[in-house]
Image (cartoon, helix red, strand yellow):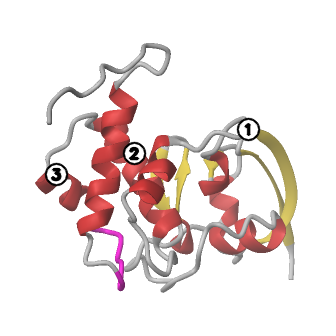
Amino acid sequence: MKTYPISLTVNGQAVQAEVEARMLLVHFIREVLNLTGTHIGCDTTSCGACTVHLNGKPVKSCTLLAVQADGATLNTVESLAQNGQLHPIQEGFHEMHGLQCGYCTPGMMMTAISLLEQNPDPSEEEIRWGISGNLCRCTGYVNIVKAIQYAADKMRVPQDEPQAAEVGG
């Protein structure tokens, strides 16, 4: 099978590889780059487990070819934690118990980050609509919505300013 050279930036690092024309981006990410946080769920764009950011937009990597990513910037779930610090969306999923089996979680988080970049203060309805292309077969979405609300709150508060202590009783 003939291969084609591709070059792209993955999680901030320059990558070059030879890929078959028919290789799906999700397989490139998992098998060539060994970044297994991106999950394969359905191969039909139905579940969203394979969602990554391509040039800053969420895409389902099971229906894109790796050659289509040539020259692009790709971010996977592995790019979220920085300098040993969880991204607010990761923290939200942990703190609000937004996962059970965890299979949908990487794609759900990547979709949620894009939602919060477009709408930093979404309502519950807007969150549910924003993640509607990602399926979770375990949670019923309640805690996923809470996790995204948690991340939204955390992302709106400047990290270098102390948060006001809650008073009451």
Residue that carries the numbered disc 1 in the rendered image? 12
What x and y, as percent, mark residue 97? 40, 65
Residue that carries the numbered disc 2 in the rendered image? 114
- Element type at marker 3? helix
Disc 1 or disc 3, which is closer to the eye?
Answer: 3
Amino acid type of the residue that numbered disc 1 sits on in the rendered structure: Gly
Would you say the magenta stretch is mainly helix, strand or loop?
A: loop
Q: Is residue 146 left or right of residue 42?
A: left
- Element type at marker 1? loop
What x and y, as percent, mark residue 95? 42, 55
User: Which label sits on residue 126?
Assistant: 3
What x and y, as percent, mark residue 145? 26, 59
Report how far apart the C-alphas of labels 1 and 3 lie in the structure. 30 Å
Relative to 169, does residue 49 appear above or below in the rendering? below
Q: Quadrant of the N terminus?
A: bottom right
Residue farthest toward the front in the current orientation of the protein: 169
Q: Quadrant of residue 122?
A: top left
Residue 135 is one of the magenta-drawn residues: yes
Report how far apart the C-alphas of labels 1 and 2 lie in the structure. 18 Å
Tell which circle, 1 or 2, labels the residue nearer the N-terminal end.
Answer: 1
Q: Is residue 77 left or right of residue 60?
A: right
- Element type at marker 2? helix
Q: Which residues are magenta?
A: 132-138
Report how far apart the C-alphas of labels 2 and 3 lie in the structure. 13 Å
Amino acid type of the residue that numbered disc 3 sits on in the rendered structure: Glu
Residue at 22% across / 54% down in the picture?
Answer: 127
